[in-house]
Image: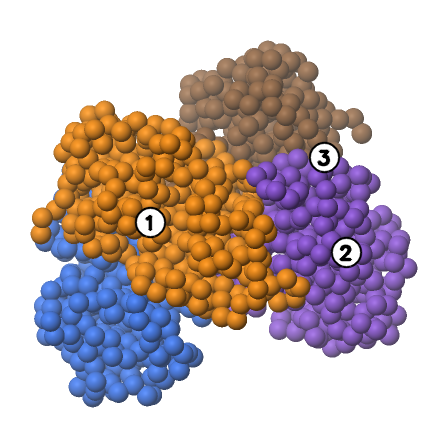
Chain colours: A purple, B orange, C brown, D blue
Amino acid sequence: MHKIPIGVLGASGYAGRELCLLAERHPGMDLVFATAYGQRGQSVRVGGRDMTFLATEDARLEDAELVFSALPHGTSGEWVMRAQSAGSMVVDLSADFRSGNGDPSQTSSIPYGLTELMRDRVRTARVVANPGCYPTAILLALAPLITGGLIEPGSAVTIAAASGVTGAGHSPRPDLLFAEVSEDFRAYAVNNDHRHLAEMNAVVKDLGGDADLIFTPHLLPVARGILATIVVRLRQPLNDPLSVWSSAYAAEPFIEVASATPSIRDVVRRNVVRISATVAANVRQPTLIVTAAIDNLMKGAAGQAVQNANVMLGLDETMGLPA
Amino acid sequence: MHKIPIGVLGASGYAGRELCLLAERHPGMDLVFATAYGQRGQSVRVGGRDMTFLATEDARLEDAELVFSALPHGTSGEWVMRAQSAGSMVVDLSADFRSGNGDPSQTSSIPYGLTELMRDRVRTARVVANPGCYPTAILLALAPLITGGLIEPGSAVTIAAASGVTGAGHSPRPDLLFAEVSEDFRAYAVNNDHRHLAEMNAVVKDLGGDADLIFTPHLLPVARGILATIVVRLRQPLNDPLSVWSSAYAAEPFIEVASATPSIRDVVRRNVVRISATVAANVRQPTLIVTAAIDNLMKGAAGQAVQNANVMLGLDETMGLPA
Amino acid sequence: MHKIPIGVLGASGYAGRELCLLAERHPGMDLVFATAYGQRGQSVRVGGRDMTFLATEDARLEDAELVFSALPHGTSGEWVMRAQSAGSMVVDLSADFRSGNGDPSQTSSIPYGLTELMRDRVRTARVVANPGCYPTAILLALAPLITGGLIEPGSAVTIAAASGVTGAGHSPRPDLLFAEVSEDFRAYAVNNDHRHLAEMNAVVKDLGGDADLIFTPHLLPVARGILATIVVRLRQPLNDPLSVWSSAYAAEPFIEVASATPSIRDVVRRNVVRISATVAANVRQPTLIVTAAIDNLMKGAAGQAVQNANVMLGLDETMGLPA
Amino acid sequence: MHKIPIGVLGASGYAGRELCLLAERHPGMDLVFATAYGQRGQSVRVGGRDMTFLATEDARLEDAELVFSALPHGTSGEWVMRAQSAGSMVVDLSADFRSGNGDPSQTSSIPYGLTELMRDRVRTARVVANPGCYPTAILLALAPLITGGLIEPGSAVTIAAASGVTGAGHSPRPDLLFAEVSEDFRAYAVNNDHRHLAEMNAVVKDLGGDADLIFTPHLLPVARGILATIVVRLRQPLNDPLSVWSSAYAAEPFIEVASATPSIRDVVRRNVVRISATVAANVRQPTLIVTAAIDNLMKGAAGQAVQNANVMLGLDETMGLPA
């Protein structure tokens, strides 16, 4: 089989490493370069092969038919433009062109790559903005409720989400040391202004939703995985809540609808979101409690990026992805 | 100093062990017996001393001026009655006599020992029902909002809480093995019917509250600690949210009001609740995000039990308790 | 491709579950039954498929061309005999027929399935005794030193090894609860009489070795993985210690010789042993420090069992195994 | 009671923080300053009190009767000299003046503060070099064997030790991030040249020992604690190995001799070493397996430093220390 040449920018972080591993094992991809500023020149084992990281400046972007950028927010955008000029398609894992971020006139032309909701736009795009990890789990859980008009208009949707520490990246911050994270749990960005909120609000609005998201992320003492617990006030009672997702996502290979509450362990190292929902007892207003789990590095980053790349390249959407 | 003779029923669980340790180190208490059905006859090291666990049947209840019962729910009630008949005061850590549990005609005569809210009733009681771990954190956080009339009437109060595994007790359940809990995180009782909800609803009603609690507990891969993240819709905007708690609890030795979001690490092995609050940005209705952290075995169980015992026995309320 | 029908006895433990997963994903195997006493009748998800566990008594052993037994020590032996009578080949993961265990007259006819050392005997065997997890790591590390005559005769070989908790099995023992294992580390069987010692001593003797093994296992707060640190006194100095293993194992697909000390993370979820060695400085006698890492559930149990089955069935030895 | 003014240099690392906490709670000490280069000017909560860290240059050394230095190796030595010139006593937690480090003519005049072995020299010293964490556990375990002449002369003593990550300090190294350490275990310094080896060899020689130490440290996925497993060849068989330590250390408040193998959990947050020993079965030469556990931040650093300070200051040796 012909293998499509692929490059990875920003390969030394957690998402970048996962991208290299997925690209290396992908039957339709040939990883031709990987860049990492801080580790340039270093030889790194990726799957069964030794690679030498380049400085990003030294990568021959034109050699790659498609480039993944896992460069930091703020830096990535420029390299996306350069890769596009060099003739490459790009999946950008940074926030630079995501809905709700940056310059709307620019981001509106770049599809927000929540693949299941944007497949048609992704198929013909040259650049795709890969969603953030929290938004991937939360928006895939909320979308059928929004498009089905099931949420009480004007109500608050309360989201408590928790992420493993790889979500905070690979930078050596003192607060991410083992001895600080182990046996601890804490909320952050508790005033409802996490960067991912703007991203989620923009998509909710695009989908026609009218709800106030109240989003509190937490840091978990685990390496990888996200669990979101979402409380939604319904317009009217629902008898069979799971059918909302099982019908909306019937044909989706990477969405699992489960009667049992998903846990992080169910999804780790897999490119899936796993969703469950239950009607709340003991309340006066009809209320749904929805839980959604993903692996932040897979469906929440590198896996979804490869899923988007598969669609952009005309490959089978599931190729090379662990489900 | 005269030491008051104390007994512990059900000493082999996590709360029971913590009770023995606190009683052993307490300058005003003398631990005269400890019982444990499964480990009766075994010698156990408690603090600096070796104790032999008795069968509960073999304890001379009358030897103790005050008995702590950490027996299982359903079993404890009977032993509380026996200890009372033998002339002992009792702090019952089970749910058997807590608000919202069991027979209301009976439980109404037994104060619910959330010490800070019920000190006057605890002072004269012969039996006190020690609160559950989640309710301790959540009700101490909610109480000033309820009594201050700050919550929008009829609104939902959404609570996502997470507990370390000692909250599930010391029984060897396969799902609590290290290899199952490590690197995982999951919600449970997601349909809003956890046993502690009835307890919280009863107290909220007693305090004059009118809100629907939606409570989703989660299991954390940590040994001890609870963090509750509570979203409250306010009747009207609040400028200085922290002042709600700092004024209500100004004189309380075991309540900390903090501008930084509390984490489990801040409170572990201490008999405190640590509370913070922030006004939510990016929403149309005035909304508060409150976080509260406790150690589930200290302020959430054994520590609060000793706090109640101190009040009942006329000792200094802080005696023998790590703050 | 023709798929060979396979059965798993004792599928509910950690090794049994891993066996089911490997068999389910194996391109040359068809998992036709799995048994689990305690969970008989339960439907369990294995890879992408739902299976119902049978009682071991209800399995039609004759339907499987090869049976893996992950039944407990003491119980397994009888089922190995039954499966053999029913015409099945067997890989027995219990200790019942391992070297150094049970009746020597019986075990001597059953090859000890350390595949790399016993491939020729495994190829023609109807029953293979799959090695224990510690012996797999330690014997593969020691074998080239023994067969090369490099160890000082009569000296002691000191082995400190540490295993993740899945090595202790899936039984709900109180001492394996998360809250007991987390943040702890301890040695066990410290008087040099662990069951695996007899197994190792028997193989060392078979290989012609003359050394006293002193083996101290430890329990690690991780789910899976074993690291063994082995100190060996040499007959004479060695200039290039790694060449001992890189030449002995040059053609082996599942043995990695590394200049950097291996860590558990290097081998988890892979059917490999990773070995390194360094000459000790600051000592008078020539001394080697050897480290070896495996995943106790893969190369230390289910993976090696499949490796043996591949050899017995005439399949490619690496088929279906993650390297 | 008169409180002695105390200063802490290098208060932001793990040992420095623990020192501040111990000094703050110590009934005979008054913590008058704490310095931290990187965090100078920051307000930090220490026990029940807020402190502002100074730059080390800005500390008035003469205000402290005794100074603890937890500055980095290489830097500390100069500040020890300055503090001494300013008239302060010093306990130096760095390696700069420890036995086996630095200039022997200088270090020989500064007692090596393994309190139980050097109490008389510590009592009259103005400067004490506080031992490293591994040496504390290992030397207290070995000393009675050496001074009793029980070890086979010229033999190797094999030591596998494992430490929690706080032993590696508070610097934000990528390899100490939670996501790297969790679920991993590895050896380091495997060629027998760890800095602590020279320290141990020097003390072994001072005690009259003639043995080659082979020391392999490992990194544990726990926050704190050290376990050392030591294999010793004996001159002749020992019937009652525990009596070696129980008689040598009969009067020691901080040494526990136990028949059960100690685990990290037994000693965490306590200023003790806990030692056990067993005769090895299945070997030809009489061999002892000794295990010793300490908390690397307490008996292995800050706790022992306070113990030394108590002796230097003429206070009760146990004052302010959790046993």
- Same chain letter for marks 3 and 1: no
As drawn, A71 above or below C30: below
Answer few, some or many: residues within 10 Å of disc 2's Cα (few below 14, many 20 plus, some between 14 and 19): many
Answer few, some or many: residues within 10 Å of disc 1's Cα (few below 14, many 20 plus, some between 14 and 19): few
Disc 3 element: loop
C254 sits to left or right of B52: right
Disc 3 from disc 1: Cα separation: 43 Å
Return the residue at label 3.
A240
Disc 1 element: helix
The residue closer to the viewer here, D248 or D91, is D91
Q: Nearer the viewer, mark 1 or mark 2?
A: 1
- Looking at marks 2 and 3 on the same chain, the residue that comes earlier in the sequence is marked by 2
Return the residue at label 1.
B118
Number of numbered discs visible in the structure rendering: 3
Disc 1 from disc 2: Cα separation: 45 Å
Are the residues tagged 1 and 2 within 8 Å (C-beta)? no
The residue closer to the viewer here, A105 or A6, is A105
**Residue A267 seen:** no
- The subunit carrying tag 3 is A
- The subunit carrying tag 1 is B
Q: Residue at (42%, 63%) from the top-left corner? A: B245
Are the residues tagged 3 and 1 within 8 Å (C-beta)? no
Return the residue at label 2.
A209
Residue B60 percent across, percent down from the top left: 16, 29
The residue closer to the viewer here, D139 or D299, is D299
Residue C250 percent across, percent down from the top left: 61, 48
Disc 2 from disc 3: Cα separation: 21 Å
Residue A153 percent across, percent down from the top left: 74, 53
Are the residues tagged 2 and 3 within 8 Å (C-beta)? no
Q: Residue at (16%, 63%) from the top-left corner? A: D319
